[in-house]
Image (cartoon, helix red, strand yellow):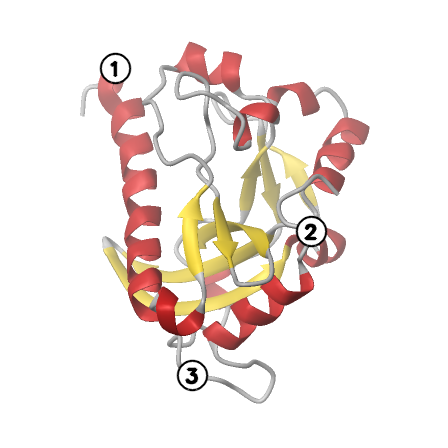
Amino acid sequence: MDSSNKWKADFQTGKNRRSEVVINLNLYLGKPVSGLQIVRVHELLKTMRIHEKVKNNTLINRKEQSTFLSAMGLDYLVIGKKGEFPLMIRFSDDPGFYIKVPSDYCSSPSKVKQFLRKIEHYYVLFVLKAGDKIYERYCGPMELRNITALCRYHLSETKGNRNRLQFNYNPSKLAYLAPEESSMFSKSLIERLKNICDENIYGNVDA
């Protein structure tokens, strides 16, 4: 692929994969029955060039208030009858768990920790994926604050990924369940989502 168009393809692929996951989940949840719905923070996202991403990669542009020209929110909100919570979607075949850090929080380890404190109320849903196939099997949602507390992390030093916070966490080693399944240690997905919404009646705010 022409490298000049790779950035477009990568962005579209990432957006489409997450959209497929959420379409599957919303069909399963059936809002009138469960009272739950999952929506993207920014419904419409502009395909940005590299210099636009660098310019717009700020915390405020990850949140709902941003305009179409600057919005960068690929994350989601899970909305229930009583509350809501922000959700990151990641895949089992990713080389590791990572978070894109806004440019205004990359200058020092203390700034990175400050950013993590601001998003510690986020949850992460891991989705089983192999090649181009996305399965309706999930692990989580897990509290981001628990991942950051238990896993070592570092800012990537590779060109083009210097704002990527990489965690020592391998999603392929997790146990993935169908949404209706429960285990000795975990309720069904609908029950887990409802419980988190009920606990997060403050909604999507900075911690």
Pinpoint residue 49: horizontal percent, then vertical percent: 36, 15
In this rendering, position of residue 175 left or right of residue 47 = right
The outermost residue toward the right is: 110
Name the kind of residue labelled 1 in the image.
Ser
Label number found at residue 4: 1
SS category of the residue bearing label 3: loop
Residue at 60% over, 71% down = 195
Which is more toward the observer, 162 or 61?
61
Instruction: Please state which of the two labelled residues, at mark 2 or mark 3, is closer to the viewer.
Output: 2
Pinpoint residue 149: horizontal percent, then vertical percent: 76, 54
In this rendering, position of residue 7 left or right of residue 155 = left
Is 199 above or below relative to 19? Answer: below
Is 105 above or below relative to 25? Answer: above
Crowd band around label 3 with a 10 angstrom C-alpha radius: few (<14), some (14–19), many (20+)? some
Pinpoint residue 179: horizontal percent, then vertical percent: 40, 75
Q: Badge 2 is on which residue?
A: 202
Which is more toward the observer, 134 or 81?
81
The mark nearer the N terminus, 2 or 3, is: 3
Q: Badge 3 is on which residue?
A: 181
SS category of the residue bearing label 2: loop
Which is more toward the observer, 7 or 193?
193
Is 163 above or below relative to 82? Answer: above
Residue 70 visible? The answer is yes
Crowd band around label 2 with a 10 angstrom C-alpha radius: few (<14), some (14–19), many (20+)? few
SS category of the residue bearing label 1: helix
Residue 91 visible? The answer is no
Name the kind of residue labelled 2 in the image.
Tyr
